[in-house]
């Protein structure tokens, strides 16, 4: 079985290769900005290097992956936001079977059997996909393994899309990535105005933490950058301490916090579902509780 793998993030590419190695021969696509790290990649039989496209160029990258995927039984991408988007787009263009957030793969008589979380992370679905197929692999499920790349091939493809990059602007970074932070403050719609988020940032500063949010704050209200949203369709966090403030704790959010060591929830509704998944629950108005907590933490620091 021929497998093509690609991720915007090379550490995740290692996980994809490891997921594919038990099924067949894996080729990894590297874009111009990734080629310098070729030596870091383990386990793939072959590296396909495309020097004319960088991983930021979403439209040409989609064209390239669509073209290359035609020669493979399985295209594997990572389950970060851009990886999931590409998964759906390539599958749609090539009319192929698709599954996202896959946590295990095996072959059964020429069909691909995948497992993935469903019902907001409460259950695991086992699905059978006809090949060829496109899947995105859940982060953290497979450990990178294997020896160095055996073969390097230059891919020369024209710009089928006709897009040209006229300017590049660096995306603002959040500091410590959410999924690596020891302390995370997750905020939800309990915050009534954007400027009130200042309370959460003050708490983050006092605890040396990072602020994340529920999906509505990033996707609908646009109060926070997209990479801040936690949950099944966002980032999965695993801090030593997670404070969930003014978030109801719906399944789709809670699926992204379950690996946290200690969860403290602050919510003024004693029936809020978040309390079911918390180690400590504080039934208070966040507008009273947060300033008092920050004040106390600052006093303790002096
Ligand atoms: C396919 C799909 C995928 C999704 N993926 C995600 C995802 O990855 N991540 C995600 O977060 N959501 C996701 N969602 C949305 C999810 O279902 C919820 O709608 C969302 O998590 C709710 O956000 P919230 O908790 O901020 O808002 P709400 O549910 O409105 O909760 C606000 C909470 O704040 C409390 N509150 C209000 N005022 C105060 C106050 N003054 N003090 C203290 N507490 C207060 C309320 O009691 C309430 O519990 C997804 C939905 C779908 C359909």
Image: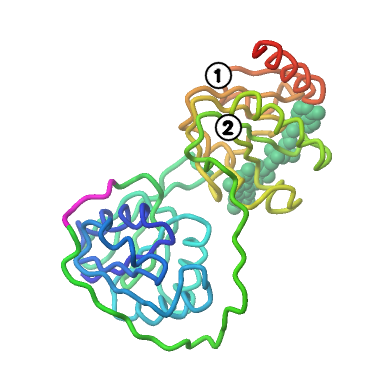
Where does residue 246 sit, x and y in percent of width and height? 72, 31
Where does residue 201 sit, x and y in percent of width and height? 70, 33
Q: Examine the rendered structure and indicate whether residue 126 appears above or below residue 275.
A: below
* Magenta stretch encompasses residue 144: yes
Relative to 109, 29 lies left or right: right
Please give the residue where the numbered disc 1 appears in the rendered image: 279
Q: What is the quadrant of the N terminus in the image? A: bottom left
Q: Examine the rendered structure and indicate whether residue 244 appears above or below residue 170.
A: above
**Within the image, what quadrant is residue 78 found in?**
bottom left
The residue depicted at 47 percent of the width and 75 percent of the height is 62
Q: CA distance from mark 2 to mark 1?
A: 15 Å
Q: Image quadrant of ligand 1?
A: top right
Please give the residue where the numbered disc 2 appears in the rendered image: 184
| Highlighted magenta segment, given as a residue range | 143-147
Tag 2, which secondary structure?
Answer: strand
Tag 1, which secondary structure?
Answer: loop
Where does residue 213 sit, x and y in percent of width and height? 65, 41
* Magenta stretch encompasses residue 133: no
The residue depicted at 81 percent of the width and 36 percent of the height is 196
Q: In front of the other: label 2 or label 1?
A: 2
Q: Examine the rendered structure and indicate whether residue 153 appears above or below residue 80.
A: below
* 2 and 1 marks in contact (CB < 8 Å): no
**Within the image, what quadrant is residue 244 found in?**
top right
Label annotation for residue 148: none
Mark with earlier residue (2, 1): 2
Relative to 73, 58 lies left or right: right
Where does residue 109 sit, x and y in percent of width and height? 20, 65
**Within the image, what quadrant is residue 3 found in?**
bottom left
Query: Residue lying farthest front?
Result: 302
């Amino acid at each position: 079985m021929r497998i093509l793998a690609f991720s915007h993030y090379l550490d995740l590419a290692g996980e994809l290769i490891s997921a594919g190695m038990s099924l067949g021969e894996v080729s990894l696509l590297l874009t111009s900005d990734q080629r310098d790290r070729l030596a870091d990649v383990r386990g793939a039989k072959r590296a396909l290097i495309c020097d004319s496209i960088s991983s930021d160029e979403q439209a040409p990258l989609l064209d390239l992956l669509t073209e290359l995927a035609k020669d493979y039984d399985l295209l594997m991408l990572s389950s970060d936001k851009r990886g999931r988007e590409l998964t759906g787009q390539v599958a749609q263009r090539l009319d192929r079977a698709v599954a996202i957030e896959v946590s295990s793969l095996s072959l059964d008589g020429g069909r691909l059997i995948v497992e993935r979380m469903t019902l907001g992370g409460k259950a695991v679905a086992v699905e059978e996909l006809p090949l060829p197929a496109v899947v995105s692999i859940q982060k953290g499920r497979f450990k990178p393994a294997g020896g160095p790349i055996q073969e390097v091939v230059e891919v020369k493809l024209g710009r089928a899309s006709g897009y040209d990059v006229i300017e590049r602007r660096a995306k603002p970074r959040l500091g410590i990535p959410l999924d690596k932070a020891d302390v995370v403050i997750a905020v939800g719609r309990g915050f009534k105005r954007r400027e009130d988020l200042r309370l959460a940032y003050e708490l983050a500063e006092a605890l040396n933490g990072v602020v994340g949010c529920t999906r509505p704050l990033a996707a609908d209200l646009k109060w926070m950058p997209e990479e801040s949203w936690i949950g099944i369709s966002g980032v999965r966090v695993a801090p030593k301490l997670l404070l969930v403030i003014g978030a109801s704790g719906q399944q789709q959010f809670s699926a992204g916090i379950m690996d946290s060591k200690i969860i403290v929830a602050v919510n003024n509704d004693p029936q809020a579902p978040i309390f079911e998944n918390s180690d400590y629950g504080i039934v208070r108005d966040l507008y009273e509780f947060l300033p008092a907590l920050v004040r106390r933490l600052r006093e303790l620091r002096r």
